[in-house]
Each structure stands twice: as structure tokens, then as C-alpha cells.
Image: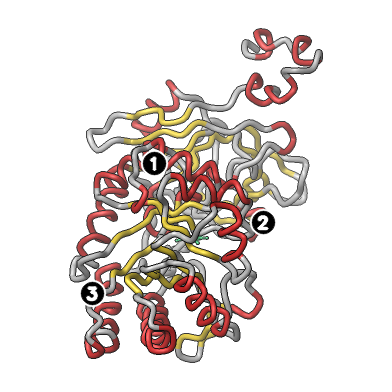
Amino acid sequence: MIKKPFVTKEKLEEIAAKYPTPFYLYDEKGIRDTAKAVKEAFSWNKGFREYFAVKATPNPFILDIMKEYDFGTDCSSLAELALSKACGFPGDHIMFSSNDTPREEFVYADRIGAVINLDDFTHISFLEDAIGHIPERISCRYNPGGVFKMGNDIMDNPQDAKYGFTKDQLMEGFKILKAKGAKEFGIHAFLASNTVSNDYYPELARILFELLVEVKEKTGCKITFINLSGGVGIPYTPDKEPNDIRKIGAGVHKVYDEILGKNGMDDVAIYTEMGRFMLGPYGALITRAIHEKHIYKEYIGVDACASNLMRPAIYGAYHHITVMGKENEPCDHKYDVTGALCENNDKFAVDRMLPKIDMGDLLFIHDAGAHGFSMGYNYNGRLWSSEILLKEDGSAQLIRRAETLRDYFATFDCFPIYQKIPFDELENL
Ligand SMILES: *Cc1c(COP(=O)(O)O)cnc(C)c1O
């Protein structure tokens, strides 16, 4: 697939004149088109709901868009629960799929009526201790162990994953939850990440639908939803083709009819918790070339660094780069594109063939809309960037301001050092 930026150079320069680089830019149209396609792909299932994985892009303006499609949120922490609640999501639209969960997070999740998705057998008693009861509606996360294969391809290793109940624990857990007052149950599993295949959800659905039938037989529990979680991927590299959510929806539908339909269980709702698929392609990190360096290799230094987007540094992940305005020029220069961290893995690209880059050029780093900004950090005292939404009408809306040194030093504000930092001077260099 040819990778094209969702914005022109002229528009980007206009935005950058107002909001200095680096910044994250999100494409409202792409997000909405995807939300509509997801809704349509699963419209055959009456109870379907996408619970957008907040951790992918935890911004209230993005969550507001999700809310317009009657989606919910999937949370993994107190902050994400609080954000969802503040954005106005009702409890049954908030899924709490956490693990290694602190007590107070269960308390708050229960208080706001979120659906609690337990990660472990021991969390049954932990939850009961924390909130004093077992909710009537509850879910458990399943880990089948072994390796997860699709055809002959090994997709992932659930046996090495820290998540979920074993099958025996799940059967036992459901019985205990039922005895303690739970009435409606869900089953959740996340078996492979960033799958660029229309077969992942259908394959996972088959495993969970068969499990549902077995759980029902063995425990008598009423299972009202199956949560396919995240894992639907995006093509980071240009040689891959994007998933077709309509095909994925139809694939799940087929398995649903085959297994649940024939057992008279066609009132089970399908839930998803996609993050990457919903937002990944519709966000970019925008940065400017500020240095070029010629030593044993050719380097381009940009004003963003791995603290803004850590995926290349920690996973060696490929993120396509477009040099704005040079889309049609030959890629005849080999560069390492680097940030300023004192870490040699702070490289957005290694040995990448790109058009000749001049100082001041804007670089569009693709597919950073999910697990991009949100994985940021402050190493080397680097600050968090702003986030901007490119609206459907072409205007640009600031949806998070850039972090300042005042924010960075705020946790020292009860110490005398805070008063000695010349913020005004530092902000006007
Ligand atoms: C991270 C995560 C997701 C979202 O995953 P994507 O691959 O971004 O779709 C969904 N559910 C849970 C429990 C997660 O941890």
C-alpha cells in the first residue's frame, strides 16, 4: 500500500506556524470513517460494542468522537477510568480490562458501574475484599496456554503471557462467581498483537464461542458477551495491505452462526477493544529537520526524539516517513533519522532511503496515532509534545497543549529548588 500523509505540506506549515514542532497530528476524517466501518461490519450483532482501548490514545477529544458512535472505552488504570467517567461514558460503556490491579482501582471501577474483566483467579477474592460484593455482571480473561497458530503460522505464545485464567481456573472461577451472586458473564481473550490478517478475530471467536458452549454446559452460567479485545493490526510497512474490517466482521458472523446459532445462543453480544486499528494510521508525529551530520553514516537530526515516539527505539518498529513536499522526489539518500536523546537507539529510521533532506524540512512520521504519544516519557528532561486534531473542515484544533518546564518540575514545587528555576527566562530563549 502506498503511504500518503493525510495533510498537505502547505497545511502543515500553517499549523506549525501556530503550534511549534514536534507535535502529534490526528485526522478526524480517518477516525470517523473507521468508526463507521467498524459499526457497519458488526451491525449483524445486536449487542455489538467497540470499547476503544484508551491506552492507545488517551485524549478526551478522541474519546468524544468514539462516544458519538455509541462506543465505549476499555480502561486499564485509575487515570483511564477517571478520564472515561469525566468524558461522560455510562458505566456499561466502560470496560475495565486491567491486570495486576491495585485495590482502589477495583473500588472506583465498581463505583462508576464499569464492567470488570478479571485477569486472574485470585482476583475473585481480592475483588470481593475490595468492594464487599461480587458485581452481577462480570467478565473473565482466558489464556489458553500453548502457542496460538493460524494455519501453520505461529502468531504468539499465550503460554508465556502473564494474562488470564487457565481453562480449569475459568470453569472453577465462573462457578464461584455464580455462587457469590454474579448473574451475567463475559469471556475475554487477547491472543496476538498487531495481526495484519482478516482471520485473527474469526479464529479467536471460534475458540471463545466453543469455550462459551463448554462453560455453559459445565457451570450453567449465563454468558451474555464475548470480548474479542484488541490485536487487529495495521500495515506499518508499505509492502503490507490493510485489514478489511468488513471481511473481519463477516468472518466472525460466520463462526457465530456456525457455533452459537446452532446451539440457540444467538443473543450473545460481541465486544471489541481495538486501539491500534481505530487510531494508528490516523495520527502522525510531525517533526522538523534541525541538523545534518556526516560521519561514518549520514544523519538527520530532528526536533522530536524517542521520548515522543518510543516504538522504533524499543521494538525496532518501522514507521514510514514522508519528507513533506518531496513526495515525488527520488529516495536516493540513505539516512539515519535521529532524535536528541543520549541513547544510540534514539533513531526513527536506520539506513532509510529518503529524498534529500534540507534543514527545516517537515517530516511526517506515519502510523503513530495509537501507542505513540501515550507511550511517551521524560528521559533526558525532554518534554511531552502537543496534540492537534485536523478537523474534517480543514481547521486545526489544539487538543492537548505541549508540556512546559513548569509542568516538568511541578513535582518539586514543594521544595526550594522550584523557586530557583528561571521559568520566564527559559521560555523566552
Ligand atoms: C492494549 C489492549 C487493547 C488494545 O490493543 P490494540 O492492539 O491497540 O487494538 C485491548 N485490550 C486490552 C486488554 C489491551 O491490553
The amino acid type found where label 3 is placed reads Asp
Give the answer, above or below, for where 255 lies relative to 135: below
Q: Is residue 183 left or right of residue 154?
A: left
Q: Nearer the viewer, residue 182 or 300?
A: 182
Secondary element under disc 1, as helix, strand or loop, is strand
Mark 1 or 3, nearer chain start:
1
Q: Secondary structure at mark 3?
A: loop
Residue at the image point whose x is 40% and y is 60% from the top: 274
Provide residue 174's location: percent of width, then percent of height. 48, 76
Question: In the rendered image, which residue does mark 3 sit on?
Answer: 267
> Is label 2 in contact with label 3 (beta carbons under 8 Å)?
no
Query: In the image, which disc is placed on residue 26?
Result: 1
How far across and down, in percent of the image, does residue 199 sit?
A: 37, 79
Q: Would you call the spot at circle 1 few (<14 residues within 10 Å), some (14-19), or many (20 or more)?
A: many
Which badge, 2 or 1, comes first in the chain's sequence?
1
Most foreground residue, 70 or 306: 70
Residue 224 percent location from the top left of the image = 32, 71
Q: Is residue 197 above or below residue 399?
A: below
Question: What's the residue at 44%, 69% (across, down)?
Answer: 239
Residue type at tag 2: Ile
Q: Nearer the viewer, mark 2 or mark 3?
A: 3
Res 40 quadrant in image? bottom left
Inter-mark Cα distance, 2 to 3: 43 Å
Give the quarter of the figure containing the N terminus.
bottom left
Q: Using the image, tell me which numbered label, if any, was put on residue 314.
A: 2
Q: Quadrant of the C terminus?
A: top right
Q: Secondary structure at mark 2?
A: helix
Contact, mark 1 vs mark 3 (Cβ under 8 Å)? no
Label 2 environment density (alpha carbons within 10 Å; few <14, some 14–19, many ≥20): few
